[in-house]
């Protein structure tokens, strides 16, 4: 059971392996979630490119890519296929998600 409680989850470097494990689990056990995750990642990075015109986050792309499915709204969509939980404005949502999770020293640059 998955419920989005709208609580922010801030990942750090310690979450990298857990995020990689979730990614692998989804692709292995829920192939349809893997396809949905591909589309979510496209929307996220497309929105991020439009909303954050800087190369400051280039070093964070793999981390952001891996932790994206750990966000409650994204995970709910991956598991259920109900797109109602997805962000409506990927530009603003993507920018906020990236700034919260990226290294502050890179964002300040």
Image (tube, rainbow, N blue to C red):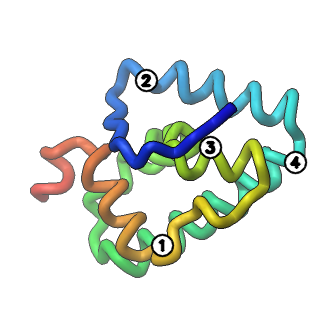
Disc 4 to disc 2, C-alpha distance: 24 Å
Residue 33: x and y in percent read: 79, 46
Closest to the observer, 45 or 54:
45
Q: Are marks 1 and 2 in contact (CB under 8 Å)?
A: no
Which residue was labeled with disc 4? 32
Earlier-in-chain disc, 4 versus 1: 4
Crowding near pointer 3: few (<14 within 10 Å), some, many (20+)? many
Residue drawn where x is 45% and y is 46% of the image:
64
Earlier-in-chain disc, 4 versus 2: 2
Residue drawn where x is 79% and y is 45% of the image:
34
Q: Is residue 86 above or below residue 4?
A: below
Question: Element under label 3?
Answer: helix
Which residue was labeled with disc 2? 15
Earlier-in-chain disc, 3 versus 2: 2
| Count of picture labels | 4
Comparing labels 3 and 2, the label whose residue is closer to the camera: 3
Residue drawn where x is 26% and y is 49% of the image:
100
Q: Is residue 1 above or below residue 85?
A: above
Disc 3 to disc 2, C-alpha distance: 16 Å
Earlier-in-chain disc, 1 versus 3: 3
Which residue was labeled with disc 1? 90
Quadrant where the image shows the C terminus? bottom left
Crowding near pointer 4: few (<14 within 10 Å), some, many (20+)? some
Q: Quadrant of residue 48?
A: bottom left
8 sits left or right of 73 in the view:
left
Comparing labels 1 and 3, the label whose residue is closer to the camera: 3
Which residue was labeled with disc 3? 75
Disc 1 to disc 3, C-alpha distance: 16 Å
Residue 90: x and y in percent read: 48, 72
Earlier-in-chain disc, 3 versus 4: 4
């Amino acid at each position: 059971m998955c419920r989005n409680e709208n609580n922010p989850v801030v990942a750090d470097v310690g979450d990298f392996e857990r995020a990689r494990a979730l990614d692998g689990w989804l692709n292995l056990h829920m192939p349809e979630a893997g396809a949905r995750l591909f589309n979510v990642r496209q929307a996220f990075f497309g929105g991020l490119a439009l909303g954050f015109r800087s190369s400051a986050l280039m070093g964070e792309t793999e981390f952001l890519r891996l932790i994206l499915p750990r966000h409650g709204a994204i995970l709910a969509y991956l598991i259920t296929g109900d797109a109602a939980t997805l962000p409506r404005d990927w530009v603003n949502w993507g920018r906020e998600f990236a700034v919260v999770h990226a290294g502050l020293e890179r964002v300040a640059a």
